[in-house]
């Protein structure tokens, strides 16, 4: 899993993409769908995922342009959920 993450990060850097890794309180597939619809409305967001099995409910967002955590956080919080940068 770690090697896969490293490969994805290298590929993103080559494409000038940004990968944001955040802990969240998105716990169900319904909540993930709600957040996903909002994130998908932004053309600079290439893809996103939420690991519902992880205890931190990790939200990963890959963007086509440099993006700040606060931008993603504001979208998620506007929907009534929370997320914050997951520091390694």
Image (spheres, rainbow, N blue to C red):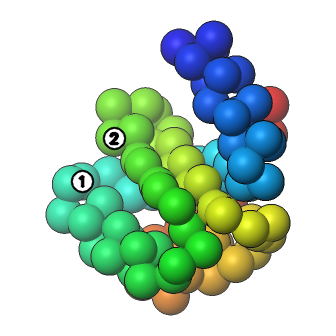
Q: Taking 63 as reference, is 40 above or below it?
A: below
Q: Residue 48 carries which label?
A: none
Label 1 crowd bin: few (<14), some (14–19), many (20+), radius 10 Å: few
Quadrant of the image occupied by residue 80: bottom left
Task: Tell me residue 76's x, y (percent).
Answer: 51, 75
Quadrant of the image occupied by residue 34: bottom left
The first of marks 1 and 2 along the sequence is 1
Element marked by disc 2:
loop
Residue at 42% across, 83% down: 41
Q: How many marks?
A: 2
Q: Mark 1 points at which residue?
A: 28
Task: Tell me residue 47's x, y (percent).
Answer: 47, 56
Residue most toward the front?
15
Q: Name the residue under label 2.
A: 52
Asked whether the viewer can see residue 80, the reply is: no
Element marked by disc 1:
loop
Give the spatial CA distance, label 1 vs label 2: 7 Å
Q: In this view, does 24 lie to the left or right of 52?
A: right
Q: Nearer the viewer, residue 14 or 22?
A: 14
Q: Taking 14 as reference, is 71 above or below it?
A: below
The reply to whether the C-beta atoms of the residues labelled 1 and 2 are less than 8 Å apart is yes
Task: Tell me residue 52's x, y (percent).
Answer: 34, 40
Quadrant of the image occupied by residue 63: bottom right
Viewport quadrant of the C terminus: top right
Residue at 21% across, 54% down: 29
Q: Taking 43 as reference, is 9 above or below it?
A: above
Residue at 41% across, 47% down: 50
Q: Nearer the viewer, residue 72 or 31?
A: 72
Q: Taking 18 as reference, is 41 above or below it?
A: below
Asked whether the viewer can see residue 13, the reply is: yes
Label 2 crowd bin: few (<14), some (14–19), many (20+), radius 10 Å: some
């Amino acid at each position: 899993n770690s090697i896969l993450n490293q490969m994805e990060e290298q590929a993103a850097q080559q494409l000038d993409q940004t990968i944001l890794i955040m802990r969240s309180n998105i716990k169900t597939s319904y909540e993930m769908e709600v957040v996903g619809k909002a994130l998908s409305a932004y053309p600079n967001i290439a893809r996103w995922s939420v690991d519902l099995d992880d205890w931190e409910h990790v939200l990963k967002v890959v963007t086509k342009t440099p993006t700040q955590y606060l931008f993603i956080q504001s979208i998620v919080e506007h929907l009534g959920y929370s997320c914050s940068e997951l520091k390694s």
